[in-house]
Image: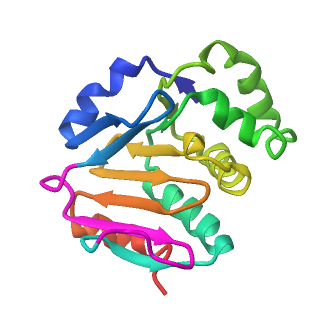
Amino acid sequence: MDFLPEQEINELLHELGIAATQDNDDCVHLEMGAKSADVRDCLCGDEPSCDDDWNCTTVTPEGLVASSVECATRIHQGQTVLVPCGKWRSVFDAVAFSMAGDELWQEFDASATIKLNTRDPLLFDVGDEQILASLLTALMNDGETPEQSVFLIPAGAPILMHLQPTGPVKLWFGNSVLADEVREAYAG
C-alpha cells in the first residue's frame, strides 16, 4: 500500500475512458464515458436515485456496505488504486476510530501525514486485500459526506467503482462479462 503521484494514473484513466470533473473546491468526480462503459450498475438505498440508463439495485444500508466491499474484493485482482473525491484527510478522519485496532493501518496512517491534503491515488497491491476490505468497510460505515467518497480502479480491467458512504454506489464496466462476475456480489 503506497501513494502514487496523481499524474501517474493519468494514462490509465485515459485508456479506460475516465474523465475527471471538479464540482467545487472540495470534490473531484470520476466518470467512465458512455463509449467505454457497456454496463452501468448502481446500488441504491430505499429509493433509486439513478438515471434511466443505469441498472439500479435497491439494497438495505447493511447490504450496501456488504455488497460494496464484496464488489471491491472481486474487482481487486493484483493492483488497484483508490482515488478520493475530496482530500485524504476527510477519509482518514472518517475511518480513524474503526481502523484504530488495525496495526498495519496504524503504521501506514502515521507515515501518510504528508499526503492527507492531497488527492494522490493510493495503490493496493497483491496481499493488500484485507486492509482494502477493512478500510472500505470502515468508510462505508463511518463516512457521512460526499467528500469522503472514493473511486476504485483496477489496473488490469475496464472498471470504475464510486463508493459513497451514504450511497449510491456506482459501477461502470467496460464489458458485460466483467459486470456479470462482479454483479454476483449484489444480485438477488
User: Is residue 47 located in the magenta-colored stretch of the structure?
Assistant: yes
Q: Which residues are magenta?
A: 33-51
Q: Quadrant of residue 13?
A: top left
Residue visible at 52% across and 40% down in the picture: 126
Residue nearest the viewer, comparing 21 with 128: 21
Is 100 magenta? The answer is no
What is the quadrant of the N terminus in the image?
top right
Q: Residue furthest left?
A: 35
From this view, report whether residue 69 is shown above or below residue 185.
above
**Within the image, what quadrant is residue 97 found in?**
top right
| Residue appearing at x 59%, y 47% in the figure | 129
Q: Residue at x 27, y 33 (%)?
A: 12
Image spot of residue 29 (x, y percent): 39, 41
- Of all residues, the one furthest to the right in this rendering is 101
Farthest residue toward the top? 114
Q: Residue furthest bottom?
A: 188
Q: For the image shown, how many numbered marks are present on the structure?
A: 0
Please state the horizontal and vertical placement of residue 159, each as a whole percent of the image. 32, 52
The residue lying toward the viewer, choosing from 59 and 180, is: 59
Q: Is residue 180 above or below residue 90?
A: below
Residue 178 on image: x %, y %: 30, 64
Q: In the shown orientation, is residue 24 left or right of residue 155?
A: right
Q: Residue, x 67% and y 43% (percent of image)?
A: 131
Q: How is the image coloured?
A: rainbow
Q: Position of residue 183 (x, y in %)?
A: 41, 73
Q: Is residue 179 left or right of residue 62?
A: left
Q: Main secondary structure of the magenta part?
A: loop
